Image (tube, coloured by chain):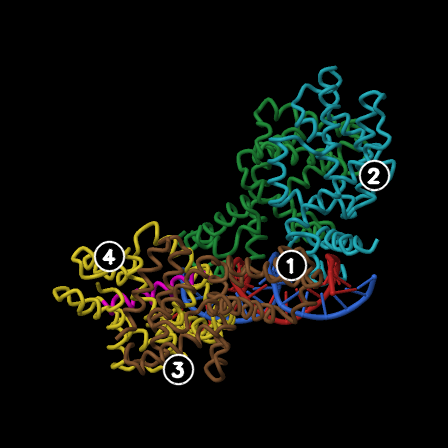
Chain colours: A yellow, B brown, C cyan, D green, E red, F blue
Amino acid sequence: MKASDKRVDVMQAALELIAEQGFHGAPMAAIAKKAGVASGTIYCYFESKDALITELFQELEGKINGTLREGYPVERPLRERFLYLVRGLLRYLIAHPLHFRYMEQYFNSPYGASMRRDRLLGKSGNHDQDILMEIFAEGISEKILKDLPIVVLFSLAVGPLISLMRDHIFGFIVLDEALIKQTTEAYWDAIKR
Amino acid sequence: MKASDKRVDVMQAALELIAEQGFHGAPMAAIAKKAGVASGTIYCYFESKDALITELFQELEGKINGTLREGYPVERPLRERFLYLVRGLLRYLIAHPLHFRYMEQYFNSPYGASMRRDRLLGKSGNHDQDILMEIFAEGISEKILKDLPIVVLFSLAVGPLISLMRDHIFGFIVLDEALIKQTTEAYWDAIKR
Amino acid sequence: MKASDKRVDVMQAALELIAEQGFHGAPMAAIAKKAGVASGTIYCYFESKDALITELFQELEGKINGTLREGYPVERPLRERFLYLVRGLLRYLIAHPLHFRYMEQYFNSPYGASMRRDRLLGKSGNHDQDILMEIFAEGISEKILKDLPIVVLFSLAVGPLISLMRDHIFGFIVLDEALIKQTTEAYWDAIKR
Amino acid sequence: MKASDKRVDVMQAALELIAEQGFHGAPMAAIAKKAGVASGTIYCYFESKDALITELFQELEGKINGTLREGYPVERPLRERFLYLVRGLLRYLIAHPLHFRYMEQYFNSPYGASMRRDRLLGKSGNHDQDILMEIFAEGISEKILKDLPIVVLFSLAVGPLISLMRDHIFGFIVLDEALIKQTTEAYWDAIKR
DNA sequence: GATGAATGAGGCTTCATTCAT
DNA sequence: CATGAATGAAGCCTCATTCAT
């Protein structure tokens, strides 16, 4: 409990600063100060700023994956499984707005760009993504979904989700349960045949 | 025509550098070099880097607005007008990938954040957006579109468009006319009642 | 005369600080301060600290080369040419003690190590050295000098020269003309058959 | 025997790292790691990095002194005694290249500079040096050696030895017994009348 | 208007040393 | 004695901006 404390503190401080102000607004000194440690201490746990940023991203990704895996209704119809995933993701992001904003910053940066390229070549490493992809593949072959490239279906479903999360965070809308239900059904409408 | 040449050169250089490498990869010295002017010269035309970035954004926004206004089929049915706009936007972005990437950089940065806040309070200033909003308002009252907040319809339609553009730029897909047609119809499916 | 000033000032400041205190005692900030410029200014003229150090070394080397080339008695006997070179070198170093100490620092550092390796493989690039080598080769084939590897003759001649310069700089001895004459003859004794 | 193990380990680790990579390449953490102890442990045995460096130097110096004292032919002629010493030194350094490189690093650093100053004022503390000095004093008064300051004779003899050791370590030459014999005789030629 | 040398605050990282355990 | 996490001063370098020419 002791040794881990500072590492966690640093990650939390980095999460908050980067999510709220971007990488630009999060110099190592500020992260250290917010975490209540000395600058050098960060380097006891992370090799560099890049490493901190990447590990934090992977941590958040892992948490989301874990959350979505729980209770995933493997045996239910495609539509239900799809809605389970996107709703689960949406609820998670609403509950953890900092995670959402951090991941957005990450994707929109050299870090995210190189990661995307890696994943394009190798395997995804991202569980939700994998599960969604499988759902899409199944849906296409069973003629439930539109006959489009899987990547396209992915964008049709996740693109609006991201966009709505932004509106929610900026306060343009309030994503309550009713709206979650309605918008996720709209994603389905976009991809279903 | 001579004096304003340099202003244009600077904006073009900034566009290319920022679109391709992000704000991080576009120091003023690099922009000046690429534009073929001296560093100090930039400050003859722009008060600061922030000003350059913002003016460039507004310039691009204006160009897109102008393009979309042309030939807008005011008298045609709602669906057609919607598809006209999103397809026009998509084709414009495909033809001008640097504009797309620049605007993404812009939205995902302190600049974009404050802009969004401004627009939330005041008026949009963005023409396409306004037109789309009007289409949505009309569609809701005529019970053609889902009864959701206009902002939500906007995200349902534009979110996937952005996401697909990214896939296109990263080379995951090729947005040819067939795919443009199919995907934009999917946006319509997402918002239509 | 203006543009060059600062570059020269920086090199002079670096020379003095590094010669007197070693690389450790010459942070860029101190060099800048001593040169009367801002830290960043150094980077207008040198790409990095390494570049500054290397360019300064090459500058000093060039000066010595130039000095020794002047008046070199090509037509005189071997012994005379040898003495001309070592005495010229010794007088130069006595007149420019900072140059000597700087070059010692340089040779005794990662910079010098990699340089030596480079020179071992490629060509020397150092004129005096080349001339001395030629003298040695000639002396061996004419049976004037000991039949030893050229590198060994070089060390037999230059090793004591360096060592004496150190003594001189530390004030253990005063290398006046008499002593220059005597010691350089001793180098000759060491290498002559 | 157990307690002093770590002290020895630390000194050995410091010797290797500093000899091979210079002071720059030997942070305390690296020394500790190589020695298999914790960073803080070093401070149980040495007050500071400076102290470690100095004590290590003195240790090496002592070892060399001890080696050279053994079998020193007090009763033999001057030339023989001289050759005994320089050859012994050369053989020792060839057998212990890390010692040589460490001492070079040491001499060429603020540590060495202040040491030299100390020795100039006080007494030498270095046994070999003392013995050599005595040989030189004797040789001068008996008109066997050149009539030069003792310090100068020292440099004439030891300067080339150091220089040759460097060539040997860098692989430019191989100091085998034949070369040892020849080069040490060359030192003698340099100092003998 | 145009230049580009100069500035210096601010960013990331290293490392000798300390100290609570 | 031994540990190694923690410290923070200090080092190298970048870059938006200014200003004398």
The residue identified by callout 3 is A171
Question: How busy is the neighbourhood of tag 4: few (under 14 within 10 Å), some, or many (20 plus)?
Answer: some
Q: Are marks 2 and 1 in contact (CB under 8 Å)?
A: no
Neighbourhood count class around disc 1 (C-alpha, 10 Å): few under 14, some 14–19, many 20 upward: many
Please, which chain is the residue tagged with disc 1 on? B
Q: Which of C190 and F16 is in front in this view?
A: F16
Q: How far apart are marks 3 and 1 (CA)?
A: 39 Å
Q: Residue lying at the far top in this picture: please name it.
A: C142
Residue wearing tag 1 = B32
What type is the residue that disc 4 sits on?
A: Asp
- The residue pinned by badge 2 equals C91
Assess disc 2: are there few (<14), some (14-19) or many (≥20) residues with their C-alpha within 10 Å of its C-alpha. some
Chain to which mark 2 belongs: C
Mark 4 or mark 3, which is nearer the start of the sequence? 4
Kind of residue sitting beneath label 2? Arg
Instruction: Evaluate whether residue D40 shows in this view.
Output: no
